[in-house]
Image (cartoon, rainbow, N blue to C red):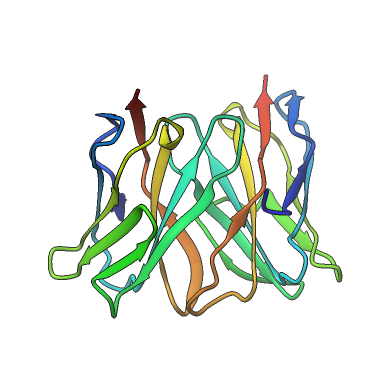
Amino acid sequence: ETGVTQSPTHLIKTRGQQVTLRCSSQSGHNTVSWYQQALGQGPQFIFQYYREEENGRGNFPPRFSGLQFPNYSSELNVNALELDDSALYLCASSLGASGVNTEAFFGQGTRLTVV
Amino acid sequence: DQQVKQNSPSLSVQEGRISILNCDYTNSMFDYFLWYKKYPAEGPTFLISISSIKDKNEDGRFTVFLNKSAKHLSLHIVPSQPGDSAVYFCAAATFSNYKLTFGKGTLLTVNP
């Protein structure tokens, strides 16, 4: 077990709605990254937060936004949900945002279904 | 444009034999490579990593080989065990920006 927890584990939303996913990082880790894993694909980088600041963003539209809190937990918010947003959303925590031996430890994911 | 490719969607081996999972990358800026294992309904679990200054890294039954000139890495599992059955993801990053770029994964099945 990694110590990274995500909530909820499953979620069903209607197209056009908004959703908030939550992640508690592993103790001592100050960096949280979010990934989207569509069916049959590898995880795709959404963005990363390092010490409460966004520290890099993947190829996702602005309706994907996030926050990191002083305790280094994090939220992923998605507005105006589309059917293609249906995926497994993974949170990963690490100690540091760069360098060697900063392996990311993943939570179990939130399965989002948009109908 | 997929920068990390795992061309074998699946691999089946007998228990006790060697499993070899392959990964190719196109971005020469990558200098850190990782393998993750994923069981259904769980997040990916870190397995082993290698930096670009090395060509081999071992951890127990798992060995990763890196061929920088060919932009190719492989994961060897010896001996393979039924509990190794999972999806294996290859991922790459740069030291300056720890954004992981993943391949699509290879489903390994180890038959008893």
Q: Nearer the viewer, residue A27 or A41?
A: A27
Above/below status of A17 relative to A65: above
- Residue at 73% x, 61% y is A26
Q: Is residue B1 visible?
A: no
Which residue is farthest top? A115
The image position of residue A17, as x and y in percent, is 77, 31
Would residue A96 appear left or right of A80 to someone viewing this image?
left
Among the 4 quarters of the image, the one containing residue A105: bottom right
Can residue B101 be seen by looking at this rendering?
yes
Q: In which quarter of the image is residue B16?
A: top left
Q: Residue furthest right?
A: A70
Residue B69 is left or right of residue A16, and the answer is left
Quadrant location of the C terminus of chain A in the rendered image: top right
Residue B106 % position (x, y): 34, 37
* Residue in view at x 51 percent, y 70 percent: B98
Coordinates of residue A63 in the picture (x, y in percent): 68, 48
Image: B33 above or below B84: below
Q: Is residue B49 above or below residue B8?
A: below
Residue pictured at 78% horizontal, 37% vertical: A18
Q: How many marks?
A: 0
Residue B21: x and y in percent read 27, 45
Left or right of residue A91, residue B15 in this image: left
Q: Which one is in front, A58 or B53?
A: B53
